[in-house]
């Protein structure tokens, strides 16, 4: 299936397929036989056994997947052997199978760039000039707030993504609307509360 899909995409000029799997940690709440099947599928993806060239897979998981010895990846030895840390290297090693994004704190410039990438995707998908409404100054201020947010109940990256996306959506619907950077601290707090209330604290604690 992957081979056919990638072949079709490349026929039409695309470089390949990027597959994003979010909230893999939801397997922790499944029955043992379902977890085992899911972990075997993950092992297959890590081994690239069924993946053709020009296909890249990124999975997001929380630290609980590594610390829970009864239900996490440690409980499936074949997968654990492929994911367990091989050293105490500091920082993020993007060449390894597992990249611990929490090992390095994002800077204000990093957050600004995340906002810019979201804006580019939004502009392309909706065919509009998003930078005229959601300006560089707005994204710079959003990056500063995200970089200095330390006491929020939800990870600053999640909040920034939702704030920027919401402002882009609103500006696209009403192109007279101009996001106000001065309101960002209030908006960040509101979005943090909304995300925190949407799920239990345990689920979001280490996201």
Image (cartoon, grey):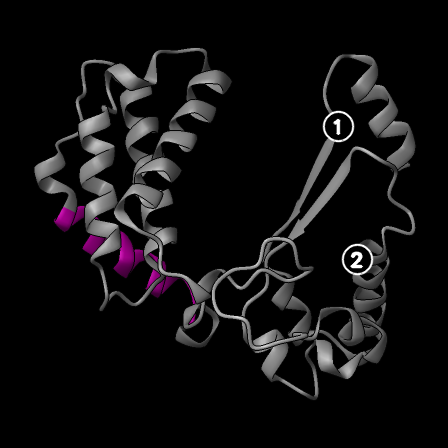
Residue 190 drawn in magenta: yes
Q: Is residue 153 above or below residue 3?
A: below
Quadrant where the N terminus lies? top right
Give how far across and how far down residue 16 sits, in percent. Answer: 75, 28
Quadrant where the C terminus lies? bottom left
User: In which image quadrant can residue 19 be found?
Assistant: top right
What segment carries the magenta color?
185-200
Residue drawn at (18%, 29%), measured in percent from left and top?
137
Q: Is residue 43 above or below residue 122?
A: below
Front one among 93 and 192: 93
Residue drawn at (29%, 18%), measured in percent from left and top?
131
Contact? badges 2 and 1 (CB < 8 Å): no
* Disc number placed over residue 16 in the picture, else none: 1
Residue 87 drawn in magenta: no
Numbered disc total: 2
Q: Which residue is mark 2?
A: 46
């Amino acid at each position: 299936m992957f081979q056919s899909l990638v072949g079709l995409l490349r026929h039409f000029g695309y470089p390949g397929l990027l597959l994003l799997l979010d909230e893999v940690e939801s397997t922790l709440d499944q029955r043992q036989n379902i977890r085992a099947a899911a972990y075997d599928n993950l092992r297959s993806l890590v081994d690239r056994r069924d993946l053709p060239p020009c296909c890249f897979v990124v999975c997001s998981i929380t630290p609980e997947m590594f610390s829970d010895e009864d239900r996490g990846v440690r409980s499936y030895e074949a997968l654990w052997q492929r994911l367990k840390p091989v050293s105490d290297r500091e920082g993020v090693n993007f060449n390894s199978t597992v990249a611990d994004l929490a090992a390095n704190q994002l800077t204000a410039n990093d957050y600004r760039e995340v906002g810019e990438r979201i804006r580019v995707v939004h502009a392309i998908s909706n065919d509009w000039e998003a930078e005229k409404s959601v300006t560089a100054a707005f994204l710079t201020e959003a990056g500063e707030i995200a970089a200095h947010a330390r006491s929020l109940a939800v990870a600053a990256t999640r909040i920034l993504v939702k704030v920027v996306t919401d402002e882009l959506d609103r500006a696209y619907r009403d192109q007279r609307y101009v996001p106000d950077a001065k309101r960002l601290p209030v908006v960040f707090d509101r979005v943090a509360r909304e995300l925190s209330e949407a799920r239990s604290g345990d689920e979001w604690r280490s996201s």
